[in-house]
Image: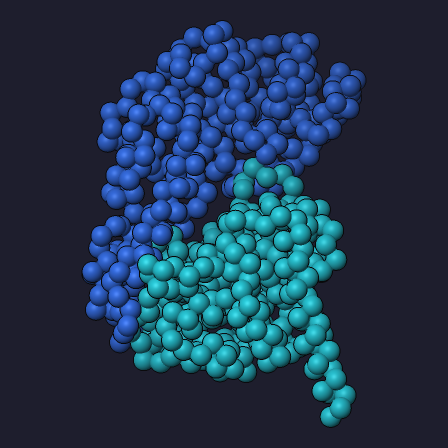
Amino acid sequence: MVPAIGYAIREQNRSILIDEPAVNAVEITFERADDPLRVERYVGDIDVDYISVHALKLSPGSPEPPAEHYLEALKAIAVENGAQSVSDHLGFTRDVHEGSEMGHFAPVPWTVPALDATTRNIDLIQDYFSPLHFYIENITYLFRLEGTMSEAEFLARLLKRTGCGWLLDVTNVFANATNFGFDGYEFIEHVMPAAPRVQMHLAGGFWDEKAEMYIDSHSHPVPDPVWDLYRHALRLGGDKVDAVFIERDQNFPDESGWRDEVRQTRRIAEQVAQQRFALAASA
Amino acid sequence: MNQETYRDQLVRMVQALVKPNNEVAVASDLANPSTVDQVKMFVDGNLEKRFEKLQKQLEFVAESFEDFDELLVKYISDVPSASYDSGTSDGDRMLQWLSRTQSPTPEQLDHIACQHARHAVEDQARRNRLKHVRFQELRSMNEQSLAELETNEQLRVYLNPIRTWARFITEELLDEDSQPPANVLFFANGNEVSTAVLELEGQALINELADYSPCTLGEWAALSQLADRDELADLCRDLADMGLVAFG
């Protein structure tokens, strides 16, 4: 089975999403869709098989559950646009209700109390959005907090405890592996068995000479090492992989650039599916 | 560590990372080989995004201040972003901060009032999305509805539910036909915000319709203290043209 494939919707790729045969899925970034004056539904004329709503502020790692009004707003966008799933990031953006917001998610400390809090929140989130599936994304981070287990162990335990899906951001794994010196392939191998279902993100960033870090800026084409890791993840994920989305937020490509990248994403997925089919047939 | 200490850790971290130059406060939380400089990159990136968002959102207000970017930096440094800040809430808080801390001129106050009214319209649309969408759908049929305005006794007049008043105290933002102080109506017009400056009688009729809407023209005429049926029909045509009423 080949997963549904497409882009995170940006105004710059809308025309591609309407007529590109390689696209049969889109991801709605909630904060972009949350334009209160918009009369039409956010997906507009885009007609695809699979739609997911991607949130930024559920803050599943926070000690308190997400606010009701934010859940309601997310659900409204999901329902209005016919989404099958909702996703957010494994991290925290705020301290407590009525408190402060950092603006971007930071990694939780990989500890048991953090795991307990995140589990509690994801259980609540899944209950709220059911029957839509919820996926938790592994984030890229510039720093890590002191913990008692590895990120892969934390994530695998979280997926097992909650039964939620994994939004495997392949580029985030590549960036973190590059910046913090671990094996991205092993990371995916460790976590994948715990995931009941999977979505994937692909993107391209750049090497920051000054910081000596790979920055996941969504500003460049997907680099070759990420394509390789993606192929590996597809082999491991098999039929559990529901959808793959490419993210681009800066330095937008021209029309052929948009089309080429999503065709490449589909071509690799089809190759892996054929290989798996051939292997199964020979067995 | 238990849940309470985890909560304390996150509160302490967020409080340190929502403002510039506090990164060292989380040094003891970092795992090897993470550094305070890396935390600073995270904080600076977040503050830069907040700056750019506010700069874009408050572009109109910025026109009336000579040093708006400096004020933005000061605001961001003084006032942390609040939980679930999205849409216009941070921008609105900055408008309040400007009014409170910068002793704005009357012209600057008008810019602030104008921007605040736009935010209020967006906020109403967010909280009443179904009403907004339904009204705009009805409005798309105004041409055909207006043809029946005086013949169809069942036709009901709907006042645009997404609207708010602002008061301008100077000529700065008024056209030459209007004199300050003036009450200006801000309302959703499709995906945009439009404005209308109405004379006192028009304002009173809008407020009257707000009390009765939705109602038929006949019902409004029977209840109105201000105008007869023909005058109300003419007003409906004008308001329909502006995007303030629809029929159904």
On the rendered image, what quadrant is the C terminus of chain A found in?
A: bottom right
**Relative depth, front residue between B244 and B34:** B34
Residue furthest to the front in view is A209
User: What residue sits 57% from the left and 76% below the top?
Assistant: A233
**Relative depth, front residue between B8 and A21:** A21
**x, y percent for residue A22:** 71, 60
Image label count: 0
Q: Quadrant of residue B168?
A: top left
**x, y percent for residue B17:** 28, 56
Chain letter for cyan, please: A
Q: Is residue A277 left or right of residue A233?
A: right
B49, above or below A175, in the image: above
Colour scheme of this structure image? Answer: by chain
Q: Is residue B16 left or right of residue B245?
A: left
A147, above or below B123, in the image: below
User: What residue sits 42% from the left and 81% below the top?
Assistant: A153
* Rendered colour, chain B: blue
User: What residue sits 34% from the left and 38% below the top?
Assistant: B93
User: What residue sits 28% from the left and 23% below the top?
Assistant: B104
